Image (spheres, rainbow, N blue to C red):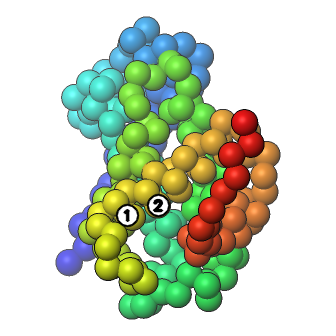
């Protein structure tokens, strides 16, 4: 049975989160007050406390929601598949970069120095957990501890996403999707030391 959530609750939570992010874009987290948030959201303190215990709880709720949606978008190209061949995936089906682009203000704000939460680590950890808990890679060699492959790839993807945001989304989302597919299947055997 599906649980019904009152639209007024959704609306008030959304307004409070939006007001908080508006404040966070302008000043550091520790300077933001609940009174300021509810005034901007056009609600009262009791409405705030009906949904959130504190501003810390509010920011954690925003981050958790953002990371859950990120995982949905990472899984989107193959959510109905049992076995995935990265060489056969269509880059157009990869929506995670579109998700970050559509939520540009949110992620730029979360990555700003106004927030003392390591969102970079949280993004990487969420991807790492997805890979470890839900994927089983086929390896061409047995001398690799697969845990390190998951961590390596998760942090690589997180690093790409974060750098892309920091570079103001300069590379088109579809190009980022193509690059991710190529990077997931490329093998390098040697390199040259240039200096």
Residue 33 falls in image quadrant: top left
Locate residue 69 relative to residue 190 in the image: left or right. Answer: left
Marks 1 & 2, CB-CB < 8 Å contact: yes
The foreground one among 64 and 143 is 143
The foreground one among 24 and 161 is 161
Please give the name of the residue rendered at 66% of the width and 57% of the height, measured from the top-left corner.
191
Residue 180 seen = no
What x and y, as percent, mark residue 123? 43, 47
Most extreme residue toward the top, as rendered? 31
Please give the name of the residue rendered at 29% of the width and 67% of the height, measured from the top-left corner.
145
Q: Quadrant of the C terminus?
A: top right
Location of residue 24 with respect to 129 vertically, above or below: above
User: Crowdedness of circle 1 by 10 Å Cα count: few (<14), some, many (20+)?
Assistant: many
Location of residue 50 with respect to 140 vertically, above or below: above
The foreground one among 86 and 32 is 86
The foreground one among 19 and 138 is 138
Please give the name of the residue rendered at 56% of the width and 39% of the height, measured from the top-left corner.
107
Location of residue 13 with respect to 144 vertically, above or below: above
Read off the residue under disc 1: 150
User: Which numbered dot is residue 57?
Assistant: none
Q: Quadrant of the N terminus?
A: bottom left
Locate residue 144 relative to residue 24 in the image: left or right. Answer: left
Residue 90 seen = yes
Q: Secondary structure at mark 1?
A: helix
Q: Secondary structure at mark 2?
A: helix
What x and y, as percent, mark residue 38? 42, 22
Locate residue 165 relative to residue 33 in the image: left or right. Answer: right
What x and y, as percent, mark residue 171? 78, 52
What x and y, as percent, mark residue 43? 41, 27
Q: CA distance from mark 1 to mark 2?
A: 5 Å
Read off the residue under disc 2: 153
User: Crowdedness of circle 2 by 10 Å Cα count: few (<14), some, many (20+)?
Assistant: some
């Amino acid at each position: 049975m599906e649980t019904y959530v009152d639209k007024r609750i959704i609306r008030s939570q959304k307004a409070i989160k939006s007001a908080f992010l508006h404040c966070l874009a302008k000043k550091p987290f520790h300077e933001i007050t609940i009174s300021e948030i509810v005034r901007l959201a056009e609600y009262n303190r009791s409405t705030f406390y009906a949904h959130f215990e504190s501003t810390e709880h509010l920011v954690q709720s925003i981050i958790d929601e953002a990371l859950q949606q990120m995982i949905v978008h990472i899984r989107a190209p193959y959510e109905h598949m049992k076995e995935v061949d990265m060489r056969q995936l269509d880059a157009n089906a990869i929506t995670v970069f579109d998700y970050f682009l559509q939520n540009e203000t949110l992620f730029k704000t979360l990555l700003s120095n106004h927030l003392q939460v390591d969102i970079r680590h949280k993004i990487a950890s969420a991807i790492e957990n997805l890979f470890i808990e839900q994927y089983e890679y086929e390896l061409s060699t047995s001398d690799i501890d697969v845990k390190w492959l998951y961590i390596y790839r998760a942090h690589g993807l997180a690093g790409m996403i974060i750098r892309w945001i920091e570079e103001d989304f300069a590379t088109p989302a579809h190009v980022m999707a193509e690059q991710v597919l190529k990077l997931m299947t490329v093998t390098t055997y040697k390199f040259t030391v240039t200096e």
